[in-house]
Image (cartoon, rainbow, N blue to C red):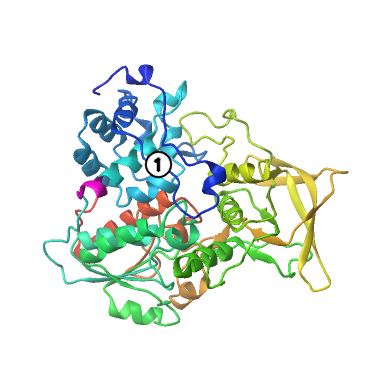
Amino acid sequence: MGKPTGFMEYKRETPPKKDPFERSKNWQEFTLLMPESALRQQGARCMDCGVPFCQTGTSMDGSGEIGCPVYNLIPEWNDLVYRGHWKEALERLHKTNNFPEFTGRVCPAPCEGSCTVAISDDAVAIKSMEFHIVERGFQEGWIVPNPPRSRTGKKVAVVGSGPAGLAAAAQLNKAGHWVTVFEREDRIGGLLTYGIPDVKLPYHVVERRINLLKEEGIEFRTNVEIGKDVSAKQLKNDFDAVVLCTGATKPRDVNVKGRELKGIHFAMDFLTANTKSLLNSNHQDGNYISAKGKHVVVIGGGDTGADCITTSVRHGAKSITQFDINREKSNERPDNNPWPLFPIVHTVEDGHKEAAAVYGKDPRAYQVMTTKFVGDAEGHVKEIHTISVETTVHPDGSKTRVEIPGTEKVWPADLVFLAVGFTGPEEQLVRELELETDTRSNIKAEYGKYETSLEGVFAAGDNRRGQSLVVWAIHEGREAARECDKYLMGASNLP
């Protein structure tokens, strides 16, 4: 490395962000770029460790993930940034990740949890380095269309244009196949476009990459739902291979008395309608679920729940509360979560910071279980009844929840968002193709192989592995493209 002692000389710095209170008044991206001198210092913090766990992308005894799923060459591009070789750093970054501008914004950075410096100090700021490298590439005009030199004549259909679908399409196009991406929504991007608030991942960032892929020869068809507008069997007949990247979009419901009341919505319905209205008319069309002036309760403690907070703050909600059924995590790793596993610790997301700035406190309430919803005379939710619970996690992963007597509470609620996860892919396409599924209703396709029970049909991303990270979707899309290429050509040069 260019600066062997850099990790001892420099402290971790991440990009500054606009004030939480001020930024909550608009939908603009709020992360600011750092000066080059500061970034070179951050690159210097990447130590010359013997085994860079940050880029391993593996698991330890099934107890958790380690490092970057796409195997980013992190030490290499950190060193290149330290030396001022930005274009070379971009080339190394693109070798393993088709869309670093996405992961540099929304990835939770498992790589940083596995950083060797993080054993005893703050991790290298890997995610922000990735973000700055790719944005520098766009600013300098280094990122340009790179269509294949020749075509194989083979046609591949990719169903779904989220991160897995886009990654698969990009790689298959690179191999010279004619690729058509089918998307049932009116815009390309899937989860990237409508599942993540525009302040976290602006659509113009997604569209910028889509335009490059179009110029490289990929055809995108929106407003086409396979199984409805085009039959799945017709798709199979018209193309030499099919890659299914439809995500795990079937939301998990809650079996609680009063669930039928008006004002209770799945989180993704809320987020999708909000972004669609924002992009179509800057919310002038009114085609979204407004939280303005309402007591909002988000049930579910994960990222989707935090995204509901981010959105509700900007609507002007009267109050926001997020229910997490689990205990508040410690700021330190628990004993069963050692380095280099992804750290299971307490975090404060941007949405939580904004809610605290606007309403005066962190919106989260822990160990809270909903017992019933209560409505008014018009059948609209007005309050939620809860009780505190103690959760025990057993060695086999199962959980037992015990109610704590005397902890009953009533919360005002005009609007409730259910963000308790997803149960798998939607079933219509799976049934039409008669695909085998696993015990969790995901499409059955072996990891590393990705071929389904139907020859020539592959599956990748959340519809195969269950709800997961954008970076895992990109990884699976790339690998499925390689296996599809092997199927079509007998061998593959794709990574």
Front residue (pair 229, 18): 18
Q: Magenta stretch: give its range.
A: 137-142
Apparent side of residue 203 relative to residue 81 in the rendered image (left or right): right
Q: Position of residue 472 (x, y in %)?
A: 41, 50
- Residue that sits furthest to the left in the current view: 149
> Of helix, strand and loop, which one carries label 1?
loop
Q: Position of residue 312 (x, y in %)?
A: 61, 56
Residue 138 belongs to the span the image colors magenta: yes
Q: Position of residue 71 (x, y in %)?
A: 33, 41
Front residue (pair 280, 398): 280
Q: Residue at x 32, y 41 (%)?
A: 132
Q: Is residue 148 visible?
A: yes
Circle 1 Cα neighbour tier, 10 Å, few/some/many (<14 / 14–19 / ≥20): few
Q: Which residue is mark 1?
A: 32
Residue 139 belongs to the span the image colors magenta: yes
Q: Residue at x 67, y 37 (%)?
A: 328
Apparent side of residue 90 relative to residue 71 in the rendered image (left or right): left
Q: Position of residue 100 (x, y in %)?
A: 33, 48
> Is 269 located above or below residue 477 in the figure?
below
Front residue (pair 358, 157): 358
Magenta stretch, main secondary structure, is: helix
- Residue that sits furthest to the right in the current view: 406
> Is 35 located above or below residue 186 in the figure?
above
What kind of residue is marked 1?
A: Leu
